[in-house]
Every structure is written in C-alpha cells, then in structure tokens.
Amino acid sequence: MKNNKIIIVGAGFVGTTLAWCLSNHYKGEIILIDKGQAGNGVTKQAFAWLNVSYGRSDAYSKLRQQALNEWHYLDKQTNGKLKINWSGAISWQETESATREFINVHRESGFNIKALTKAELQALEPQLTILPELAAFATEEGAVDPLHATQVLLQEALNNGVTYLPETEVTNINHNGKQILGVTTSQGIICADQVVLTAGVGAISLMEKLGEQLPLSASPSVIVQYQHQAVTPFVHHIISTPDMEVRPISGTTLLAAEDYLSDRPEHSATYIAKNALPVIKRAFIGSDSLCLENASVGLRPMPEDEMPIVGKVADYRGLYMISMHVAITLAPLICRLAQEEIINDIEQTALNPYRLTRFASGSCH
C-alpha cells in the first residue's frame, strides 16, 4: 500500500464490525465514515435473531452455522459487553410433518436442535396459549440489540485508533483508471489505497457513479416494538411461528418482525403493527396490557440471488464490498474472513461462493 489507509463507507453493524476486526490486526490508518450516526440506519431496524438458515444450500447452511459459532466467540472476546441473550429459539411450521422435517434437516447438518412435546413447550413458555404437538428448540441461537452491539464495537475500534467520521456523506469513489484513490465526501476529499463499501443499499448509487450496476435492491421489512405493564414477562424466548415472530428485548418490551406488504397508506408499518397486535395477545396469557410503541420500515440490501456479496469489485484495484441481507448474523464471521483479504490479500476460500463475479454479464462483475 502507498499510504496505508483504508476507508470503510457505512458504519452500520457490518462496517463497524469490520473496523473493529481490522483495528485488531492492521497498523495503518482506518477511517470509518457514515452519512448519519453509527448503527442508526437499517441496523437499528434489525430483528437481530442470531440463527442458522433453513432450506438453503449446504455451503450456505454451513456458513450460517459457522457464523453462529463466531458470535459465541465474539461474546467471549468482548467479555460479555454485547449483552447477547442466548435464550434459544422456539419455532414450528404450518404442519407437524413440516416441523419434523425442519428438525431433521437441522440435525443432519450437525446443528443442535431439540424436538419439544406440547408439555415441554409449555414448561419453557408457560403463558403460551397455542401449543402444537411438536415444536423445535434451537438451544444455541440468540438475539442481540444491534444498536448496542454496534456502539460497543465502535468504542473498541476507537480505542484501537480507528478514525470515525459521522454525519459525513460519501458522494463519490475517486479513481484513476482502475486504481482507487479514495472518496469525495460532504466534508472534502479523503485519499486512501483501499475503499470498502459496507453501506447497504447506499452502495448502489455509489457504484452507479462508477458506471457499474450492482445486482442489489432494497428489501423492506417491518420492525415493531410493543410495550406492556405485565409484572411477569410472558415471552421468554425467540418465538417464530406461521403467525408471528417475536422476542423479548426487556422486561416490558417485545420486538416483532412483520412482512412488508406495499407502500400503499393502508399497508403502513403502523397499520401492519396494529393488525399483528391481537394475534400476539391471543397467543400469550397476561398480555392484555400490550400496546404499540413504534413501528418502522427498514430497507435491507438484497442481492439478486439472496446470497451475500463479499470481495473485490470488478477489476478495480483497492475496491472491496460486503453486502448481506442477513447482516447481523453473518457480520462477525464475514468480517474476520474479509480482514485477511483486505489486509494481506490472502483469498479466503469460504468466501468464494459469494463473489460478485457469480452474476451474469450486465451486472457489475
């Protein structure tokens, strides 16, 4: 490298995790830039369930399993500061046979999952009113407050010497031919040998200015916070069913993930959240006081084939990107692997299925 400087564009959970990873190994300057405040974009609107995948390719399932292991490792590395809730996740499918298949598929891939009878489920969730004959309990899964985790890793990165520039919008990636020179921002030009894009859907417009079309689009999802005044919490685990996806985030707050319908007024986040409220109330005894706190739409980056995009961009020298739909779960593992490629230019074979080059001509490759 000429000036030993790496710029990371986007200080969501992915960018901040990468900055922290790099700062533990890299002796040059690392600059983390965000158009707002760290973690206040789509990161803040993540459900942040740390889980493995279902119904995906073997390679991707293995990656997700490794990613979950990486979270357990990260928890130890940060001495529990991330406050991960390793309660485990309880789920069931539309039919008992589908739930059994779900359990079997996970077991065959080596993942620790327990089949729960109705009585066992009731023991774990005493106030649950809907008790299927069979449920799955993923004991090693958990959840994290994504904004808190971002802030903890940002502080660790700052302690390691990372420069953080909030409220600074990157407007252009600068280059001479195919050599990256740095970025132009709302505060001026910053030179660097390497630029890493972790800006979510913000990477689309930056790459368009280079004349490159990313196979990436914005995928909206609805995240809802509900408050309650129940003396005893009535949800103890992450619960995912055909009708709801909820988890407790404090003694008096529930987080729910809901499907985005459309941008029509009658399909607003608030409308969807209010419709989901009676469904959740019916599912739990003691939930009478549950009420809507807030609902918002997050725009997550969605690659065309729904798989992560990680690695060098086109034939530019010094341009790298990380873009993932399941960003919170995958970030610690992907960033550790990417760090080796960015610092030492050592190809990580585990990342090879996720290169931009896999997309057909016409897209950026």
Image: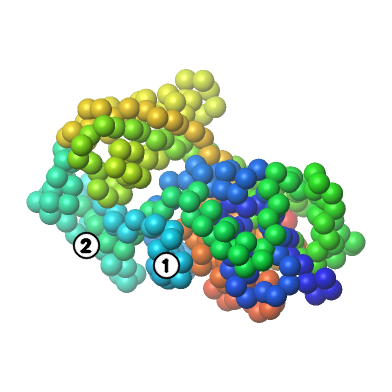
Q: Which residue lies furthest to the right in this view?
A: 176
In this rendering, the label closer to the viewer, 2 or 1: 1
Tell me what residue is drawn at x 81 percent, y 46 percent: 187
Can the viewer see residue 80?
Answer: yes
In front of the other: 332 or 177: 332
Circle count: 2
Look at the picture and state if 4 lies above or below 128.
below
Look at the picture and state if 332 lies above or below 131.
below
Mark carried by residue 114: 2
Work out whether mark 2 precedes mark 1 in sequence or the reverse, and give the earlier one.
1
The answer to whether 195 appears left or right of 289 in the picture is right
Q: Which residue lies furthest to the front in this view?
A: 159
In front of the other: 232 or 50: 232
The answer to whether 129 appears left or right of 210 in the picture is left
Look at the picture and state if 128 lies above or below 156.
above
Residue type (three-letter) at the residue carrying disc 2: Lys
Q: In which quarter of the view is residue 280 placed?
A: top left
Residue 333 point in image, percent of width and height: 51, 67
Mark carried by residue 79: 1
- For label 2, the SS is strand
Tell me what residue is drawn at x 71 percent, y 52 percent: 165
The answer to whether 191 appears left or right of 54 in the picture is right
Look at the picture and state if 283 lies above or below 21.
above
Q: Residues within 10 Å of mark 1 (few under 14, many from 20)?
A: few
Residue type (three-letter) at the residue carrying disc 1: Asn
Task: Estimate the spatial distance between the alpha carbons at disc 2 and disc 1, rounded to whole Å.
Answer: 28 Å
Quadrant assignment for the C terminus = bottom right
- For label 1, the SS is loop
Q: How crowded is mark 2: few (under 14 residues within 10 Å), some or many (20 or more)?
A: some
Residue 295 point in image, percent of width and height: 45, 31
Tell me what residue is drawn at x 38 percent, y 54 percent: 143
Residue 49 point in image, percent of width and height: 40, 52
